[in-house]
Image: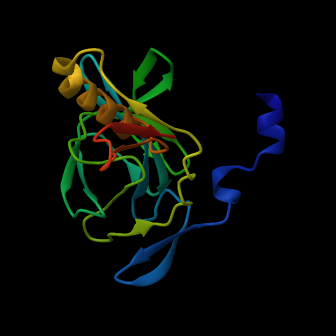
Amino acid sequence: LDGLVDFAPAPVDLAPWKGIRDGAEVTCERKADAQLAAIVVKNKVESHGRVSIVRVVSGALKPDSHVVCAKTGERERVGQLFGGIGRDQKALTHAMAGEFVVVPKLKTARAGETLCDEKAQVVLTLPEPPVPLFSRAVQAAQKTADEKASQTLHILEEEDPGLRVTLDPASHQLVLSG
């Protein structure tokens, strides 16, 4: 970790993120006093519900606050924030620009979407997802398990933005690509 601290730049030293607000390109400064902009990096479905890993790009994210999903315009309530490593999670009072936090129970936010202030909505531009290199048809062992297999594959697709689940129109099989 010392090498990372010595050689990797601090979040405030990086170039600002680019985004789109009202059809115009804007930059989001990596400062705590800027308007909130955060990216949902990954969603995980666990036994107690869905949790989202969020990277705060600018501003500060606080528990018991409301944010807007910039693509859909839907409001999300941020109930709690957690930080830490693995299962050793600690409740946080805030998350500043550059930090990764875990936010449980976001209802509609998907991986790659921007969470922001209602007053200053911005859609952050992200790199294109990788092109799938591998595709395989997926078939349940029993016909009665097809529905459950489909639901499970769509949960995996939600968790990992690099996966794609499609229905092949010719063979009527589910195809998993990634």
63, above or below 146, in the image: below
Q: Is residue 143 visible?
A: yes
Q: Residue at x 37, y 32 (%)?
A: 156
Asked whether 9 or 147 is in front, the reply is 147
Q: How many marks?
A: 0
> Percent from the top left, x then y, of residue 55?
48, 46
> Percent from the top left, x then y, of residue 25?
48, 81
Q: Residue at x 23, y 15 (%)?
A: 142
Q: Is residue 53 visible?
A: no
> Percent from the top left, x then y, of residue 11?
64, 52
> Percent from the top left, x then y, of residue 123?
40, 67
Res. 114 image quadrant: bottom left
Q: Residue at x 32, y 37 (%)?
A: 173
Asked whether 40 or 57 is in front, the reply is 40
Asked whether 139 or 114 is in front, the reply is 139
Q: Is residue 6 left or right of residue 47?
A: right
178, above or below 87, in the image: below
Asked whether 81 or 143 is in front, the reply is 143
Question: Which scheme is used to colour this image of the protein?
Answer: rainbow
Q: Residue furthest front?
A: 170
Res. 174 image quadrant: top left
Q: Quadrant of the N terminus?
A: top right
Q: Residue furthest left?
A: 144
